Amino acid sequence: MQGYGASFGIGFVAGMRSMSACAALTWAASQGRTRGDLIPAGAGARALATAAAVAEMAGDKMPFAPDRRIAPSFALRLVIGAVGGWAMAGRRASPEHGALAGVAGAVAGTLLGRAARGGDSRTSTGRSRGLAEDAVAVGLAVLVTRSAEPKRRGFHLGAAP
């Protein structure tokens, strides 16, 4: 996924499971696959983000879970998509365009994930679809993280690509 593919991909994950995207970004940063020092890469950050992702997946199956399309949730997904897209843009790619690709991915992931999932998580079918969405989000997060272009040593925030 050279250029902007990883940016779009992490945005798509953010649209499906916002905290899974955050966890994937911390793991990518720990492997030197993110731009600059914006994303924390330490073991504590990875553990916290991964725990938040697991908690989000569990909470998503609850009957009181809010719709991902409500303004605060949707806005958060767009912000995570933008930051993730910026961080995952390839070496020869514009980080600003990476952020836009991340936002586009977040919009697509939010709307397509919701459409595929359906509206009722209180039924066994809704919970099964939610579990399937969890698996897709995690699988895509792993794929995006592993396929992201490694950054050069000394590549820092604000440095030219």
Image (cartoon, grey):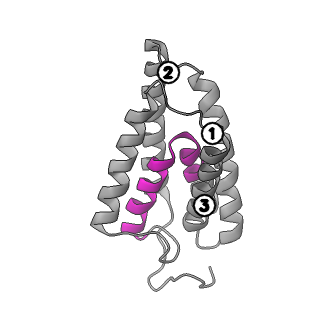
Q: SS at mark 1?
A: helix
Q: Specify the farthest residue to the front.
A: 64
In the image, residue 80 lies at what x, y percent?
57, 56
Q: SS at mark 2?
A: loop
Q: Which residues are magenta?
A: 9-32
Q: Is residue 132 magenta?
A: no
The residue shown at (63%, 84%) is 160
Q: Which residue is mark 2?
A: 121
The residue shown at (53%, 73%) is 35
Left or right of residue 145, residue 106 in this image: right
In the depicted structure, whether residue 99 falls above or below residue 11: below
Amino acid type at circle 2 is Ser
Q: Would residue 112 be visible to someone looking at this image?
A: yes
The answer to which of marks 1 and 2 sits earlier in the sequence is: 1
Amino acid type at circle 1 is Thr
Q: SS at mark 3?
A: helix
The answer to which of marks 1 and 3 sits earlier in the sequence is: 3
Q: Specify the farthest residue to the top.
A: 124
Q: Quadrant of the C terminus?
A: bottom right
Residue 85 numbered tag: 3
Question: Label 3 to label 2, Cα distance in Å?
Answer: 29 Å
Question: Label 1 to label 3, Cα distance in Å?
Answer: 15 Å
In the image, residue 72 lies at what x, y percent?
63, 47
Amino acid type at circle 3 is Gly
Few, some or many C-alpha atoms within 10 Å of disc 2 (few <14, some 14-19, many ≥20)?
some
Q: Which residue is mark 1?
A: 110
